[in-house]
Amino acid sequence: MASWRLPRTPLLLRAAQRLLLAPLRRSGSGPAPPRLPGSLVRSGGFVGGRWVQAAAAFPVLDPASGAELGRVADCGVAEARAAVRAAWEAGPGWSAAPAKERSALLRKWYNLMMENKDDLAKIITAENGKPLKEAQGEILYSASFLEWFAEEARRIYGVIIPPSVKDRRLLVLKQPVGVAAVITPWNFPSAMITRKVGAALAAGCTVVVKPAEDTPLSALALAELANQAGIPAGVYNVVPCSQQQTPAVGEALCTDPLVAKISFTGSTATGKVLLHHAAGTVKRVSMELGGHAPFIVFDSADVDRAVAGALASKYRNSGQTCVCTNRFLVQKRIHDAFVEKFARAIERELHVGNGFDEGTTQGPLINEKAVGKVERHISDAVSQGASIVTGGKRHSFGKNFFEPTLLSNVTTNMLCTQEETFGPLAPVIKFDTEAEAVAIANSANVGLAGYFYSQDPAQIWRVAEQLEVGIVGVNEGLVSSVECPFGGVKQSGLGREGSKYGIDEYLEIKYVCFGGL
């Protein structure tokens, strides 16, 4: 292990930071990349309480300009296994610590996030591209999971079961599962870490985080703050790696016998690969996978409220969230009014630009591949008779920017209604009856979130119960909350995150029979 550790000398650390903070190459037009906050930006992995380097480094790009923000250690299988070993060795001490102590350390970490919230948000906007206001909102959301699970750490209760015979006492204990490998996506590079890690650490588990290759800086900034908060060495480890190293590192984490738990947020296809790897050692798994959210607007709906909800649900983070609406279903009588008002709202309220520019509501997509998928879905829909109401093409601001787009005359045969777009595209399907809308909504093989607008109480109960999703928004387009369980059904995943249920994903139940009394 010593061969790949970065010596802890101030001179080398300062040199690495200067290299990382200096805007290097630019491969596109647009503004220069921002200068990142040096106090939180790190270029190495974080293993066993030490900043470590690997044999190679990979670039982190600003999706708005294409410029290189810096280079980060490209950790491989050896580094991943070292991180697992560090977590495993730290496990007994962390799990034995009083719940009050774990709670206090998580609270310190939360406080440091709040003290550094502006710098953390700048890092997100730089590497992810989302508007700074959204990034600031993500940091508040992210920190809230540390706050929540700091409180939940002290509420892990066992049970006493009345025995059926006189000389026994029956107990149920809850104990940490062990080392948890956490694999997170780029679209919420801070919140998806704390939602998992907060629960794991509160339960007494130790963790190894493999952040997305597009957005490793947020994970490393969290490691710096965890270290400052006094989280013991080995309890929180981060192994960033490039796209080329990701398959091998993911397999190593999922097959290592010292890892007891896998928690992953990402695509359904990747989730299935990780499940296959984890099956060999029968690990506990949590999977928050792809979505294909329907948004139903019934005749009884308040159309203005529905439009406001649609705008928030569809275009947050430029359509790059797993709970974003992917299919709009609007009942026949109000269809034309909804489309007209939705188009006006898009043109009036959405502004494409660099995430650091004031007034920007739509930043870039994460990369050109994502833009290509949006273009492909629009081209397919138009070729089958859909109409572009507004938008429909790349934005002049840069190659990763796309106009917020609204399509009408959409049918269920089109790709945009069969696949998750993950971009700023809103296709609208006209329907006649409630049964038809529910059937279309439930036709997907995934079921993460679903939304509908209605003012009919009986219809609200029926549809809420019939939608085959894990999360339902009724007359509401934004549903995520730290207090509430997040997760899906069908091929949208396994388990729940956040809420009082989130900590159970990191706990084993042990039955103790005390006899001879």
Image (tube, rainbow, N blue to C red):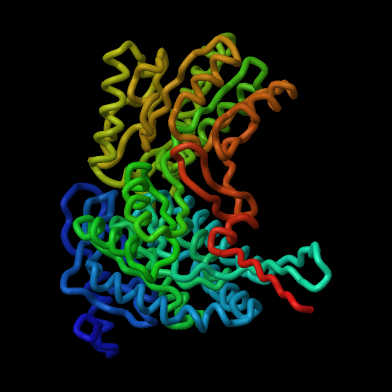
Q: Residue at x 32, y 68 (%)?
A: 239
* Quarter of the figure that contains the N terminus: bottom left
472 over 159 or under it: above or below: above
Q: Is residue 37 visible?
A: no
Q: Residue at x 41, y 40 (%)?
A: 290
Q: Residue at x 32, y 19 (%)?
A: 381
341 over 95 or under it: above or below: above
Q: Is residue 396 left or right of residue 323?
A: left
Q: Quadrant of residue 455?
A: top right
Provide residue 308's location: percent of width, then percent of height: 57, 31
37 over 341 or under it: above or below: below
**Looking at the image, which is closer to me, 140 or 184?**
184
Q: Is residue 66 left or right of residue 141?
A: left
**Looking at the image, which is closer to me, 201 or 60?**
201
**Looking at the image, which is closer to me, 43 or 116?**
43
Provide residue 169's location: percent of width, then percent of height: 76, 71
Q: Residue at x 52, y 80 (%)?
A: 94
- Count of residue discs: 0
**Looking at the image, which is closer to me, 114 or 90?**
90
Provide residue 487's location: percent of width, then percent of height: 53, 46
* Quarter of the figure that contains the C terminus: bottom right
202 over 283 or under it: above or below: below
Q: Is residue 409 visible?
A: yes
Q: Is residue 51 left or right of residue 340?
A: left
Residue located farthest toward the right when viewing the structure as drawn: 166
